[in-house]
Amino acid sequence: MPRHSTLLAATAFAALLAACSEPGQIGPLEPSAATAARAGEKVRRVEMHDACDPTSFNAVLGEGGCVRQGGITFAAFIDQVTAKGEAPAWHFAPPIVQARVGTTLLAINRGGEEHTFTEVEEFGGGVVPILNQLSGNTEVAPECLAITPADRIPAGGTATDEVEEVGTELYQCCIHPWMRTTVIARR
Ligand SMILES: [Cu+2]
């Protein structure tokens, strides 16, 4: 991608984030998750990873937008999403989870940026139009339009959800819509 396009994308990205982002808070495990883990109940972890380079990402996102060390520059990130429809280091692990109904899913943000762990009927685009466009997720997931600041999981933060019924449940990040996990639930 030509340099000026990258800068345009960065500028659009920053404007969008400034419009919809609020600073997250890094907190301990939610009590419910910690309690479930202690009691030995069924908990399945999903780790949320990224590789943001703080210097270049914070130049676009603002201070605190990326709080890890080293990593991939913002320009390289945009180039990857443009070329591949994703930046592979930004991913949920594992991509598929087999779990029994009643299992607690514990999403842990191991990256340096905010992510969401949002259950959707169908995978789709999220709340950052430029990333939707570059990744080819032009059909926005309606659940992503309904997220609140509390749904943004800061670096080091966690979120939980219950596996409620037999079948397939889909979870994605509403910021980076290629970050996805499919949960296959059985009795
Ligand atoms: Cu994300």
Image: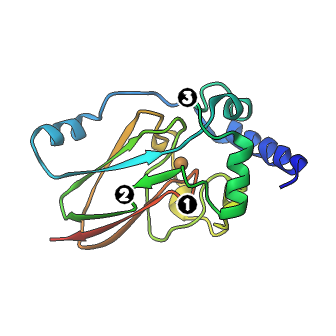
Of 23 and 97, which appears nearest the observer?
97
Query: Disc 2 or 3, which lies upstream in sequence?
Result: 3
The residue drawn where x is 54% and y is 57% is 144
Q: Which residue is mark 1?
A: 178
Where 65 falls versus 160 (above or below)? above
Q: Nearer the viewer, mark 1 or mark 2?
A: 2
Q: Which mark is residue 69?
A: 3
> Type of residue at label 3?
Gln
Q: Residues within 10 Å of mark 1 (few under 14, many from 20)?
A: many
Looking at this view, name the residue that lies furthest to the bottom: 167
Quick one: 99 or 139, which is closer to the camera?
Answer: 99
**Mark 2 secondary-structure assignment:** loop
Task: Give the residue at x 61% y 32%.
Answer: 65
The amino acid on which the numbered mark 2 sits, given as a three-letter code, is Pro
Answer with left or right where residue 145 lies relative to residue 108: right
For disc 2, the marked residue is 94
